[in-house]
Image (tube, rainbow, N blue to C red):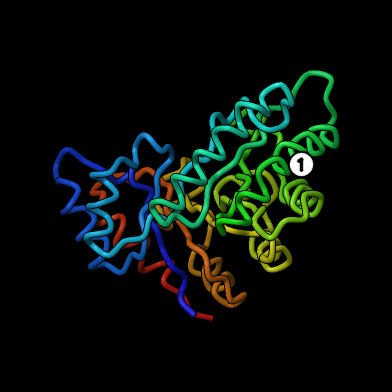
Amino acid sequence: MRIQQSLCYPLFASDEYDLNHLFAKARAIGYQAAEFWFREEAHDQVIAEAKANGLVIASVCGHTSLPVGLNDVSEHDRIEAELIASIDYAVKYEIPSLITFSGNRLEGQTDEEGLQACAAGLRRVTGYAEKHNINLNMELLNSKVNHKGYLCDHTAWGVALCEEVNSPRVKLLYDIYHMQIMEGDVIRTIRENIQWIGHFHTAGNPDRKDLDDKQELNYRGVCNAIAATGYTGYLGHEFSPKADKLKALEVAFEICNQTA
């Protein structure tokens, strides 16, 4: 079993080459997919170019925004409408998963109350997601460096949310960079919770750059552990390259192209 790798399009697009060149190069390296942050980026032309080069669209965000999310019940009507539209979009373009966000902690709201609010918001759309076989991946982000106040900032909280919702289509986006900052112990955590993980993101820590020996994560070891679980989803590269973007894609693919 080799991990299916994806490139996060906004970080690897460049004025130096066109879409066809980027996607053709990625496919030649061995990438199976591309992904986007927002639906507005994944317009018809971009998706057509990706698919013409044999790439699946692995993931897009299902709703806005990171700081204002599902823990705010006053936003549930809006988020439900956005998620329904995003599920329809995912069906149209054969996108297997959407990203969801807890939002930032609200004043006076405990983490358990926030969890229950997120669960209630997700339950409004799980039936529709299940009907169309689309995963809703709650993203784990660090609240220490990049996303101050973000609620879903530990794996245990995310797993508890998945258990509370109890839908085969509600999972986690386990961002390795973010969880290295918040809790470390990445390989053990992945092994123990793989059933709840629907997508992975990578980046070097610190600085969210290349997966090289200037940062602290051993991505060969991490990806070997992921492959050993039998994981069949995608691992998306979401780092900002230090220099040549296409070379960075090639190096990252080789590092993460592990088998059990």
Where does label 1 land, which residue? 119
The residue under label 1 is which amino acid type? Answer: Ala
x then y, percent, for residue 148: 63, 27
Number of on-image labels: 1
x then y, percent, for residue 212: 40, 57
Residue 225 in the image: above or below residue 245: below
Report the residue at 64% width, 33% height from top: 144
Quadrant hosting residue 163: bottom right
Residue positioned most to the top: 107
Residue 41 in the image: above or below residue 245: above
Report the residue at 31% width, 61% height from top: 55
Specify few, some or many for label 1: CA neighbours under 10 Å numbering under 14, 14-19, or 20 or more: many
x then y, percent, for residue 180: 61, 50
Quadrant into which the C terminus falls: bottom right
Residue placed most toward the observer, 48 or 180: 48
Quadrant hosting residue 76: top right
x then y, percent, for residue 21: 16, 54
Report the residue at 67% width, 35% height from top: 102
Residue 113 in the image: above or below residue 255: above
Q: Secondary structure at mark 1?
A: helix
Q: Left or right of 34: which side holds 108?
A: right
